[in-house]
Image (cartoon, helix red, strand yellow):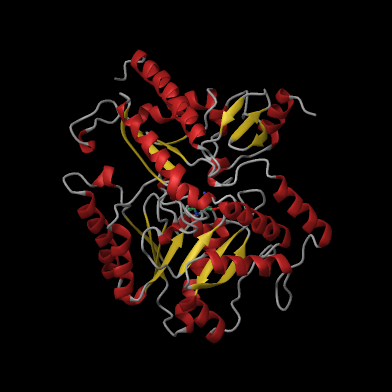
Amino acid sequence: NYDTNEIQKLDTAHYMHPFTDHKALGEKGARVMVRGEGIYLWDSEGKKIIDGMSGLWCVNVGYGRTSISKAVYQQMETLPFYNSFFNTTNVPAVQLATKLAQISPPQFNHVYFTGSGSEGNDTNVRMVRRYWDVLGYKDRHTIISRHNAYHGSTMAGASLGGMSGMHEQGGLPIPGIVHIGQPNYLESGKGMTEEAFGIEAASWLEKKILEVGAEKVAAFIGEPVQGAGGVIIPPSTYWPEIQRICDKYGILLIADEVICGFGRLGRWFASELFGIKPDLITFAKGVTSGYVPLGGVLVGDRVAKVLIEQGGEFNHGFTYSGHPVACAAALENIRILEEEKLVERVAEETGPYLKKRFAELADHPLVGYADSCGFVAGLNLVRSKGATVHDNVAFDESLAVGMVCRGYMFNNGMIMRAVGDRMIIAPPLVMTTAQIDEMVTQIRHCLDLTYADVKERGWL
Ligand code: PMP
């Protein structure tokens, strides 16, 4: 039992939220989410909301899965926790590591568990540096990432990430992490075909390698499709060229699949979709559908061989690595994904349907461009449209039209995220084609409301 006003007051008084401008939240405070079922959420006032963001890229199997809560309960009753340090292990962690080796690309046969995606990426930093140390290349420590990327909030994760707002706070990045541009065709591809732009954007990696000195570069890290950066879907030529450059210089390739993994792009791991063969894959979120925290790194044979057979002890670990309750939840989550063929459904049925319905939104006067890949999608709000996507006229950034639109969504039963003036979604993989129709209708309605509003403000 709770009183919404009381909860909101206590929230304002005591709860420091992540990535939240508390001043902007105002007196009333945050909206209180209380229940979920399938693709829907309910707030404390009983309002039903389509969760277009799966919690935050997490709830792949949807809300209300009692078989996951049962698996968690059972494991808590049997063995709630024991560490995996030194010479002990536990059954769910071993079973999950085995399962992950089965469903991931063939080069992956080992798993390093963490409690989150950020910890997974911190582990990557230490792992690739350790890899080169063991091989006798003590200077080979630089990691190349991309601007506007998000790889977590720990010191290393936030440094790998390329968000200037995060770097401004806390003196980031830490040494040994450098960035190149993102393969954002809309932003940087004017005058080029998408294919040519993909090759051009990948060439920035080679330039950076030569600038740093190939003998100093340990690894390149990137999300197959940048999520938090605004659902940036790279041209098809980009990743194969990145792979070719990494191979040319012997540089390790890390795919951060915290968002892209576990079916979100219609594959268990999205690197398969883009034809690349990473050495390490970061995972989190979708591994448990967010029901309990869990993350980790899939360790490819190239790295595992050096670390395990040659390296001896890797002085790194978290108390909750391989937490039995989290691993039990993950096993049940993966069982559901398999049983309901959700990964295949996104690849063959609902993903293509979402693509078709989402693309139709580009006829709205406010939408300059709409694209999707599997179950992530984005659309760009523009002041007016030109002959090509590169001729569209953007709103003045300071008007924050994306936030205006997000507000209409939020207050009209639809969770959609704004990244600047790009509106993005990543719905639960259980969403049906009928529910996609329902969602697109809702989005169009909110776009209409936004359009009327900005018109009245004289912004068009
Ligand atoms: N990598 C990516 C691509 C992410 O989107 C996120 C979280 N949004 C992280 C890493 C960090 O994961 P966590 O929040 O679980 O630490």
Viewer-nearest residue: 145 or 451: 451
Q: Residue at x 23, y 58 (%)?
A: 199
The percent coordinates of residue 244 (x first, y second) are 29, 69
In this view, the residue in front, 54 or 126, is: 54
How far across and down, in percent of the image, does residue 268 sit? 50, 58
Residue 289 percent location from the top left of the image: 60, 49
**Residue 444, visible in the rendered structure:** yes
For residue 23, above or below residue 294: above
Which residue extends farthest left?
191
Q: Which residue lies furthest to the top in this view?
A: 456
Quadrant containing the N terminus in the rendered view = top right
Instruction: Please give the name of the residue rendered at 77% of the width and 62% of the height, measured from the top-left corner.
Output: 81
Using the image as rendered, state which of residue 47 and residue 333 is in the foreground: 333
Q: Is residue 201 left or right of residue 268?
A: left
Task: Classify the position of the C terminus by image quarter.
Answer: top left
User: Where 79 sits versus 247, above or below?
Assistant: above
Query: In this rendering, would 210 be left or right of 442?
Result: left
Above or below, comparing residue 433 to residue 194 in the picture: above
> Is residue 375 at least partly visible in the picture?
no
Locate residue 206: give its quadrant. bottom left
- Give percent across and percent down for residue 194: 23, 49
Q: Residue at x 49, y 28 (%)?
A: 438
Does 400 appear above or below 120? above
**Figure disc tally:** 0
Residue drawn 68% across the image and 66% down it:
93
Kindly indicate the quadrant of the structure image that contains residue 115. bottom right
